[in-house]
Amino acid sequence: MRQMFVAGNWKMHGNKADIKSLITGLNAMSDRAGNAKVAICPPALYVDYVNRSLSASNIELGVQNIAEEPVQGAYTGEISADMVKDLGCQYVILGHSERRAIYKETDAEIANKVDTAIRSGLTPILCVGETLEEREAGQLEEVISTQINAVVAKVGINAFKNVVIAYEPVWAIGTGKTATAEQAQEVHAFIRNLLAGYDEGVASGIIIQYGGSVKPDNAKELFSQPDIDGGLIGGASLVAEDFMAICEAA
Ligand code: PEP
């Protein structure tokens, strides 16, 4: 039985005042998550501030990126997995479509970061997903397989016991367009099946989140699908009431 898992991706949003009021709301409403696992991923600069303000013991912390290199060194501007771990984080979002599209992160770089994260004791939330053009060209399965196979080739299938996958159709991120529950379920089942080709135990145990305009009013239906184990939430994770309503739906 897989545990439902909802994570908030704050992206590059927030300042100390906004974060204080968001965390106050999350602290007050954290019970609504019930048995679901919950994490929030603020901008790295604010992780320590969030950690010190967070009193809800059922909400864990993550970041949105790490360096490929695992340890300290001459890498100006980068943040290592070890540092993230040191600050009390458990998760790191990797391979988000914004990092793939805007910062041109390749499958090979993402695979290296997944490897680094696992070696440092972090759990990567590995994002995969197709653009609208790729979906319409019938390339969905090829795109998802390529993204996942690149990581399996680097870290090995056993390491996926410590990986969470987030299926995020690029056309649904921040657009208000959600995949229907059926569309999402179809891809989640495809991903689980792909992993089963490597190892059935890993495939049945891995948490696969859905991400892409999840809101309080569509969360329940998405999360009721057999292969959808929670969500990676962007915009709605910046509003305490909405985020906790989504956690409650899980
Ligand atoms: C995301 O950024 O991972 C995301 C799913 O964003 P949104 O929920 O705003 O679509």
Image (cartoon, rainbow, N blue to C red):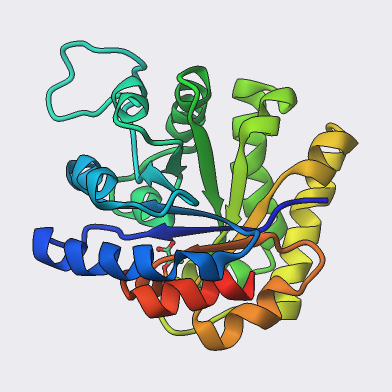
Q: Is residue 191 left or right of residue 239?
A: right
Name the residue nearer the viewer: 201 or 153.
201
Residue 105 position (above or below residue 231)? above
Q: Residue at x 65, y 59 (%)?
A: 35
Relative horizontal placement of residue 188, taking residue 173 as reference (left or right): right
Q: Position of residue 69 (x, y in %)?
A: 34, 18
189 left or right, relative to 86: right
Which residue is at the far bottom? 217
Q: How far across and down, in percent of the image, does residue 225 sit? A: 77, 72
Image quadrant assignment for residue 205: top right
Q: Is residue 69 above or below residue 150?
A: above
x and y percentages locating residue 43 in the rendered image: 24, 49
Q: Is residue 52 left or right of residue 237?
A: left
Q: Above or below — where is 111 with respect to 7?
A: above
Residue 181 can be seen in this image: yes
Residue 145's spot in the image, x, y percent? 69, 46
Residue at image coords 60%, 78%: 219
Ligand 1's quadrant is bottom left
Identify the residue shown where x is 53% and y is 24%: 118
Splitting the image into 4 quarters, where does residue 249 fall?
Answer: bottom right
Answer above or below: position of 26 versus 164: below
Q: Which residue occupies 86% across, 41% down?
A: 196
Q: Nearer the viewer, residue 60 or 131?
A: 60
- Count of numbered labels shown in the rendering: 0
Q: Quadrant of residue 208?
A: bottom right
* 56 or 190: nearer the viewer: 56
The answer to whether one can see residue 174 in this image is: no
Q: Which image quadrant: the C terminus? A: bottom right
